Structure formats: structure tokens, C-alpha cells
């Protein structure tokens, strides 16, 4: 009986050994990968003087992270004011670019240049819009020292003058509200010095056209109410179209995202212009000023419209080329700003 028990015990032991041997052995823990840190030196682009040496910079650090570290040593140069390049003649690096993806070794040299004091694009847009709105109203209400003293605070006898003031004010109020609540501006800042150039142009042209439209000797359009109404309909149609495009572009980009997508028409008929042009917001903008020109029959307005068309064509062509380079499947039927023409 004892022998049988021993045999059974040995058999069970053998089975246990077989089972334990058949179990997979646990894998040894993986060794942690060794992080290769970067050494970054920042050099003044003009004097070639070494401004800062950053040791043990993580490879996943972005250009913005490097700018933030640089600011700790030079507080007056905040990230938006800094321009970093890999070569004095190379392009400025984007904030989101990652250190380890750049064509540099573990020791990298960045060339720094000061962009000067910066303003947010939203601030610039507001300044560009508030100025023309206020200036135009000053001429409309015939404030003193603008026209002859006998016309101070007098109202024009021509109804088209009042209509033009409403349209002009509507346009710039719309732009202000869009800047505050609609636009998602991808560009961070622009140099402070540019605001004087931008505002100087918009404010001076607003004063120029307002002076003639609200002048006591202003003459109404040659074709009378028909011409005024035609210009008004064009203006309103294009204003609605412009707003529709801005909303469509806003919905295309989630908050905080920098991912670019191809804009396509939506259910809104005004966005169907996307089938034909890459920048219909500029197309509608130019159309609005064409309508305003027809409505007022004013040479300064026509000049402003022409200059605006030239400038927006340059912007539209730049964006159109950017779309073609970035998206291989970008619709080939689209033009930049004018369907089938430009």
C-alpha cells in the first residue's frame, strides 16, 4: 500500500513538473531607453555673439519650448518677439517644430533675431476697423472744421448719403463682430510698427471717401434710384456671402487646432462659391466695394476698390498656391479669386 502511494505521489509530482515546465517563463523587464539630450546654443544673428547655452534639452522639445527657456534669461524677449533660424539666411522656424526632427546634431545652433514689440492680429484688425467707422461718422455728422462753418452738424438732403453711411457703418461693425466672435486667427502676432502702416491706409482712405460722399456739394448718381438700388443689392448680397464664408472657415478649424483642411461648400448656397474659387471671402469682399462704388458713384471709393482688389488678389494667389502644395487632391477647377479668370 505504501509502495502504491509512493508511486502515485511520484506520478503526481511528475505531472506537476510537466505542467510547471510547460508554463511560459516571464520575460525579463525591458531596459529603459536611454534619452539622448540635446545641447542648444543661441547666437545673435547680427553680431554672432553666443547669447545662451542650453544643456540637456529634451529631444521632444519644440521651438516654442526653446523660446520659453531663452526668455528666462532674457525676459524682454518674449516668444512672440523671437525669431529662431538654423542658418542666418534660412527661414524662421515655426513654434510647433520639434527639435529631434530638425536637421541638426545633438549640438544645435539657433540664430536669434529680435522681431520688435508685437501685437496680436485681433488687436490689429480691431484698430483697422474702428478707425474708419469713427472717421466716416465724423464727416457724416459734419463736425466743425471739416466743411464750411455754415454746414456744421447739418444733415444732407440726399437720401443716398444716409444710405451710404448705413452701409459703410454696417460693413465695419460686421468686421468688428467677426473679429471678436467668428474668426479663429492662426497667426499669433505682428510687429507693432506694421499697425501704423495698416491703420494709416484704412483710416486715410475712409476719410477721403467720406469727405466727398458727405460733402454739401455732393451730386447723386447719374442714373438715380435705379443705380443706387442696384449698388445696394450687390453690396448686401456680397456682405451676406462674405459672412457665410467666414463662418464656414471657422467651422472648418476646431478651437486650438492648427490642422489645415480643404474648404468645401456647405448647405448654405453662399458657400457654393468654393466650387469655383479658393478664397470666396475675398471675392465677396471685392463685390461689396463694387456695389458701394455703384451706389455712391464716388471716385475715391472706386480707387479704394481697385487697390483692395489688387491686394486681395495677391493674398488669394498665395493661399491658392499653398492649398495646391499641401493637398494633392485639391480641386483643380478652382481659381484664386475670380472664377475661370484669376
Image (spheres, rainbow, N blue to C red):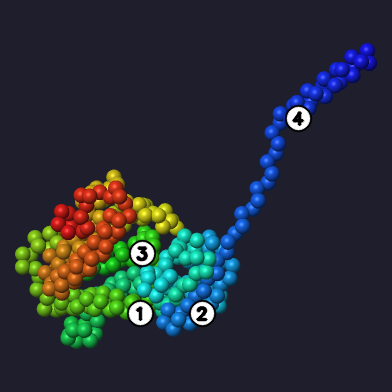
Q: How far apart are marks 3 and 1 (CA)?
A: 21 Å
Q: Distance between the residues labelled 4 and 1?
A: 78 Å
Q: Mark 3 points at which residue?
A: 179
In the rendered view, tell whether residue 86 sits above or below residue 337. below
Q: Position of residue 94 (x, y in %)?
A: 42, 65
Q: How many labels does the image show?
A: 4
Q: Position of residue 96 (x, y in %)?
A: 45, 62
Q: Earlier in the sequence, mark 4 or mark 1?
A: 4
Q: Residue at x 57, y 64 (%)?
A: 37
279 relative to 178 in the view: left or right: left
Q: Residue furthest left?
A: 222
Q: Do labels 4 and 1 touch, CB within 8 Å? A: no
Q: Do labels 1 and 2 touch, CB within 8 Å? A: no
Q: Which of marks 1 and 2 is nearer the N terminus?
A: 2
Q: Nearer the viewer, mark 3 or mark 4?
A: 4
24 relative to 71 in the view: left or right: right
In the rendered view, tell whether residue 26 sits above or below residue 6. below
Q: Mark 1 points at which residue?
A: 193
Q: Where is residue 64 in the image (x, y as percent from the top left)?
A: 49, 67
Foreground: 236 or 316? 316
Q: Distance between the residues labelled 1 and 2?
A: 26 Å
Q: Which residue is drawn at 55% across and 75% down?
A: 53
Q: Distance between the residues labelled 3 and 4?
A: 71 Å
Point out the image quarter for the C terminus.
Answer: bottom left
Q: Mark 2 points at which residue?
A: 51
Q: Dot 3, how many residues are within 10 Å of its Cα: few (below 14), some (14-19), or many (20+)?
A: some
Q: Which of marks 3 and 4 is nearer the N terminus?
A: 4
Q: Quadrant of residue 6?
A: top right
Q: What number is the disc on residue 20?
A: 4
Q: Which of marks 3 and 2 is nearer the N terminus?
A: 2
Amino acid at each position: 500500500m505504501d509502495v502504491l502511494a509512493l508511486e502515485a505521489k511520484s506520478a503526481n509530482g511528475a505531472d506537476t513538473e510537466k505542467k510547471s515546465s510547460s508554463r511560459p517563463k516571464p520575460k525579463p523587464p525591458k531596459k529603459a531607453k536611454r534619452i539622448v539630450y540635446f545641447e542648444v546654443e543661441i547666437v545673435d544673428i547680427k553680431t554672432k555673439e553666443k547669447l545662451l547655452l542650453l544643456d540637456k534639452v529634451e529631444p521632444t522639445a519644440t521651438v516654442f519650448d526653446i523660446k520659453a527657456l531663452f526668455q528666462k534669461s532674457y525676459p524682454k524677449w518674449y516668444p512672440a518677439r523671437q525669431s529662431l533660424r538654423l542658418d542666418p539666411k534660412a527661414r524662421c522656424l515655426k513654434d510647433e517644430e520639434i527639435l529631434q526632427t530638425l536637421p541638426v546634431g545633438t549640438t544645435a545652433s539657433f540664430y536669434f533675431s529680435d522681431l520688435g514689440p508685437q501685437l496680436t492680429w485681433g488687436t490689429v484688425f480691431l484698430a483697422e476697423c474702428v478707425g474708419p467707422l469713427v472717421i466716416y461718422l465724423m464727416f457724416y455728422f459734419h463736425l466743425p472744421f471739416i466743411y464750411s462753418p455754415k454746414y456744421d452738424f447739418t444733415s444732407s438732403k440726399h437720401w443716398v448719403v444716409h444710405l451710404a453711411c448705413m452701409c459703410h457703418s454696417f460693413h465695419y461693425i460686421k468686421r468688428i463682430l467677426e473679429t471678436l466672435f467668428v474668426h479663429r486667427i492662426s497667426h499669433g502676432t505682428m510687429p507693432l510698427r506694421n499697425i501704423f502702416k495698416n491703420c494709416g491706409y484704412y483710416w486715410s482712405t475712409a476719410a477721403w471717401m467720406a469727405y466727398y460722399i458727405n460733402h454739401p456739394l455732393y451730386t447723386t448718381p447719374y442714373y438715380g434710384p435705379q443705380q443706387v438700388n442696384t449698388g445696394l443689392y450687390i453690396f448686401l448680397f456680397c456682405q451676406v456671402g462674405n459672412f457665410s464664408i467666414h463662418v464656414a472657415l471657422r467651422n472648418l478649424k476646431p478651437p486650438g487646432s492648427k490642422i489645415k483642411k480643404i474648404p468645401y461648400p456647405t448647405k448654405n448656397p453662399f458657400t457654393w462659391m468654393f466650387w469655383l474659387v479658393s478664397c470666396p471671402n475675398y471675392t465677396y469682399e471685392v463685390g461689396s466695394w463694387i456695389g458701394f462704388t455703384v451706389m455712391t458713384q464716388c471716385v475715391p471709393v472706386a480707387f479704394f476698390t481697385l487697390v483692395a482688389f489688387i491686394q486681395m488678389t495677391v493674398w488669394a494667389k498665395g493661399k491658392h498656391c499653398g492649398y495646391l502644395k499641401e493637398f494633392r487632391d485639391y480641386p483643380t477647377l478652382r481659381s484664386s479669386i475670380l472664377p475661370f479668370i484669376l
